[in-house]
Image (cartoon, rainbow, N blue to C red):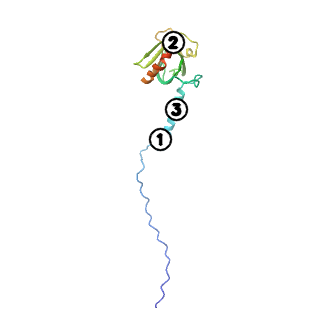
Amino acid sequence: RGPPPPPPVWEAPKKPERKPPPKPLFEPRKSGRPSLSDQLASLSSKTEAVTKGIKQSLVKGEDLGKETAALLCNGDRFVVGRVEGTFASPVQFFQDRALYAFIHPTQERIEMKMMFKHMSDIEVNDTKMTFRFRIRKPLGTSFWQWFKEDYDPQNASHFLQIGFVTKKDLSTFKAKSLPLIRQSAAS
């Protein structure tokens, strides 16, 4: 019988060859454009700024929250006598008054509260999409504090104007608020 077989020699298992990591399915864009997170953060801050602007443009004061406006629309091309407003503003028409913000070019934001019963010479221009009226006499309100140099009730060429942004707003105004204004101004 021959010599016994040599004892088995223990060998460490072979390490598998390291393969490089797989290539991604697509290469990241290198356009210099901000990441999606950065874009969303930017949009969020812009949205907050717009929302803040809208809230500031709504008329504030004792009239807010007591009743709902019969009509809320966007207005622009505001005029008081010789001065034109510099920004658009929401206009709220109630049963007896209109509320809006007039941004005076040389002063500041002025809260306008125009009572229908004080309006005269009422005109609506469908082509220009405007509502014009006059106030015939000083009322002793803060209106005269702001506009004493701009509006003269004795000057026939001086008027107040609210421009409408859309034809739909003008049409709704003519249906809902204009009859109330004409009725109040006549009495």
Which residue occupies the extreme top position in the image? 154
The image position of residue 176, as x and y in percent, is: 48, 20
The tag earlier along the polypeptide, 3 or 1, is: 1
Q: Nearer the viewer, residue 124 or 12?
A: 124
Q: Is residue 28 above or below residue 80?
A: below
- 15, above or below 109, in the image: below
Provide the residue designation for mark 3. 51
x, y percent for residue 109: 54, 22
Q: Which residue is mark 1?
A: 39
| Residue drawn at 50 percent across, 16 percent down | 180
Picture coordinates of residue 101 (x, y %)? 52, 22
* SS for dot 3: helix
Task: Determine the residue positioned at 46% across, 22% down.
Answer: 172
- Of residue 97 and residue 79, the one placed in the foreground of this image is 97
Q: Amino acid at mark 3?
A: Thr
Placement of 14 over or under 77, stated as above or below = below
> CA gap, disc 3 to disc 1?
18 Å
Q: Is residue 131 visible?
A: yes
Q: Label 2 sits on what residue type?
A: Ala
Would you name the residue on which mark 2 appears?
185
Q: Nearest to the eye among marks 1 and 2: give it.
A: 2
Question: Could you tell me the amino acid type at mark 1?
Answer: Gln
In front: 121, or 14? 121
Do residues under tags 1 and 2 come within 8 Å of each other at their CB atoms?
no
Q: Is residue 165 visible?
A: no
Q: CA distance from mark 1 to mark 2?
A: 53 Å
Q: Are marks 3 and 1 in contact (CB under 8 Å)?
A: no
Query: Within 10 angstroms of label 2, few (less than 14), some, or many (20 or more) residues?
Result: some
Dot 2 or dot 3: first in sequence order is: 3
Label 1 or label 2, whichever comes before in sequence order: 1
Q: Real-space Cα distance between discs 2 and 3?
A: 36 Å
